[in-house]
Image: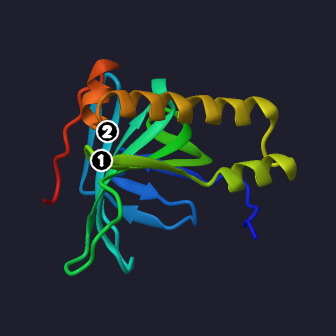
C-alpha cells in the first residue's frame, strides 16, 4: 500500500544557518555555499539510525537536489548519490517542494528510480496536477539518461551541464 501524502516542503535559511525539514524541525547547518548554479548545504543528521551527515546541492535550473550522505560508523548505504526531483524557489530562504521521484546511484555501477508509486498515487488523489507530474518524470528521465551516458558518474554528468560540484564538509 502506497503512502499518499502531499508534496514535502523544505526550507533553507542561508542567513540563519538553518534547514527546516519536511516535518517542520529546524536544524542547524554547518555550511551553506552559493554558486551561480545552485546552493550547497552540509549538516549533521541527528537521530537517524543510518545516516550521520548530509551534503547536498540544490540545482534550480535542473529541478534536482543532489546529495551525498555519510553513513554512521558500522553502517553502509546502498547508494553513493541520492537525487531528489524537486521544484526549487531560490531566495534569502530557499524553498523546495518534493516531487516524489528519487534516483539512487552507485558510483560507476548503476542506478534505480524510486517512488513512482508515490507520484502516481499523489496524482490520482489530486495532490499534484498533470503538469507537475509530467515535469517530475521529464526531470527523472533526463537525469537517468545523462547519468547512464556518463558511466554512472553523477559529478561527470553534472559537469556536462555546466554544473561543477564540490563536496566540502565532514569527511
Residue 129: mark in rendering: none
The answer to whether residue 91 of the structure is visible from this angle is: no
Residue on which the image places disc 1 = 109
Residue on which the image places disc 2 = 152
Residue 160 location, quadrant: top left
Residue at (86, 49) in percent of width and height: 124
Please tell me which residue lies in front, 115 or 63.
Answer: 115
User: Number of marks in the image?
Assistant: 2
Residue 137 locus on image (x, y percent): 63, 35
Mark 2: few/some/many CA within 10 Å (<14, 14-19, 20+): many
Mark 1: few/some/many CA within 10 Å (<14, 14-19, 20+): few
The secondary structure type at the circle numbered 2 is loop
Question: Residue pushed farthest left?
Answer: 171
Please tell me which residue lies in front, 171 or 26.
Answer: 171
Tell which circle, 1 or 2, labels the residue nearer the N-terminal end.
1
User: What color scheme is it?
Assistant: rainbow
Residue at (13, 59) in percent of width and height: 171
> Would you say 31 lies left or right of 7 here?
left
Residue 119 locus on image (x, y percent): 70, 49
Label 1, label 2: how far apart the Cα atoms are: 6 Å
Residue at (41, 47) in percent of width and height: 111
Disc 1, disc 2: CB below 8 Å?
yes
In the displayed structure, 79 sits above or below 91; it is below
Residue 134 locus on image (x, y percent): 71, 31
In the displayed structure, 76 sits above or below 85; it is below
Residue 45 location, quadrant: bottom left
Give the quarter of the figure containing the N terminus: bottom right
The secondary structure type at the circle numbered 1 is loop
The answer to whether residue 65 of the structure is visible from this angle is: yes
Residue 80 locus on image (x, y percent): 29, 54
Amino acid at each position: 500500500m502506497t503512502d499518499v501524502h502531499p508534496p514535502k516542503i523544505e526550507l533553507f535559511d542561508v542567513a540563519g544557518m538553518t534547514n527546516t525539514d519536511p516535518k517542520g524541525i529546524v536544524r542547524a547547518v554547518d555550511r551553506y555555499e552559493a554558486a551561480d548554479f545552485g546552493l550547497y548545504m552540509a549538516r549533521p543528521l541527528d537521530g537517524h539510525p543510518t545516516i550521520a551527515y548530509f551534503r547536498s546541492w540544490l540545482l534550480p535550473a535542473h529541478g534536482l537536489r543532489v546529495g551525498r550522505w555519510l553513513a554512521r560508523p558500522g553502517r553502509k548505504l546502498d547508494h553513493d548519490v541520492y537525487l531528489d526531483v524537486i521544484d526549487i524557489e531560490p531566495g534569502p530562504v530557499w524553498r523546495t517542494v518534493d516531487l516524489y521521484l528519487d534516483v539512487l546511484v552507485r558510483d560507476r555501477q548503476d542506478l534505480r528510480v524510486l517512488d513512482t508509486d508515490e507520484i502516481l498515487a499523489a496524482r490520482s488523489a489530486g495532490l499534484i496536477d498533470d503538469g507537475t507530474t509530467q515535469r517530475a518524470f521529464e526531470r527523472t528521465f533526463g537525469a537517468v539518461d545523462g547519468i547512464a551516458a556518463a558511466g554512472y558518474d553523477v559529478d561527470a554528468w553534472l559537469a556536462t551541464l555546466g554544473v561543477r560540484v564540490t563536496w566540502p564538509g565532514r569527511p
